[in-house]
Amino acid sequence: MLTPDILDTFQGLLDEAKASGDREPTAMNLATADASGRVHSRIVLLKGIDAHGLRFHTNRESAKGQEMAEHPQVALCFHWKQIREGVQVRFEGRVQFLDDAESDAYFASRPRGSRIGAWASRQSQTLPDRATFEERVAHYEAEFEGRDVPRPPHWGGYLMQPDRVEFWYGARYRLHERSVHTDGGTAWSSRMLYP
């Protein structure tokens, strides 16, 4: 469980990023590792945070979904260049599936086109040409015409439960300020790091 201090610090920084005009303040880099140990990263969007952890949603049959199934230890990193002298927040921990009810509720809140896209995209698989994807989109638009678009069984949410959190504050001459918080199992500990 994240401490109130960690949550308050993160929420304050996220609010600053939102107020700064950042187009995607909830964008975070998600790093995963495949079965061979090769690391992959990409940007996903934060859809919620509380004491239990951070929430995001994706296609569970995608490359990242398969990697998280094989190796549930992941890292997330936010980088807000336009606030203060630049801020990063790093989370490390394990992922698990969100329950179906929470995944369904979030999926239902998405624009209809995004819901159609979740059915049409065989995310991370080879696409022979753009026309093939557009045909799949048209197929699912016709299939769900006049009715609600349900959540595909291969699509859903994840909860990332951090055991390490770092706040990184940029400073002139690269004299940055870093603080790291680590979950020791029974309590969190905090320490400063050299930049």
Image (spheres, rainbow, N blue to C red):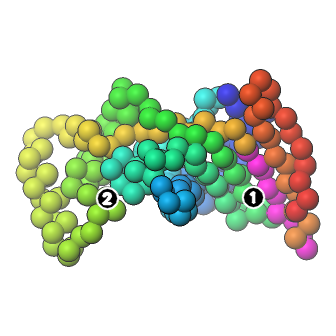
Is residue 168 one of those drawn in magenta?
Answer: yes
Q: Is residue 101 magenta?
A: no
Q: Nearer the viewer, residue 164 or 35?
A: 35
How packed mark 1 is, by other alpha carbons closer than 10 Å (few <14, some 14-19, many 20 or more), is: many
Q: Residue at coordinates 75% horizontally, 58% vertically from top-left?
A: 87
Which x, y percent locates residue 33? Answer: 53, 56
In front of the other: 37 or 52: 37
Residue placed farthest to the top in the image? 186
Q: Residue at x 33, y 32 (%)?
A: 104
Mark 2 vs 1, N-terminal side = 1
**Range drawn in magenta:** 165-173
Q: Position of residue 61 (x, y in %)?
A: 33, 50
Asked if residue 137 lies left or right of residue 108, the reply is left
Q: Mark 2 points at which residue?
A: 123
Residue 2 % position (x, y)? 70, 31
Which residue carries the number 1 mark?
87
Q: Residue 152 carries which label?
A: none
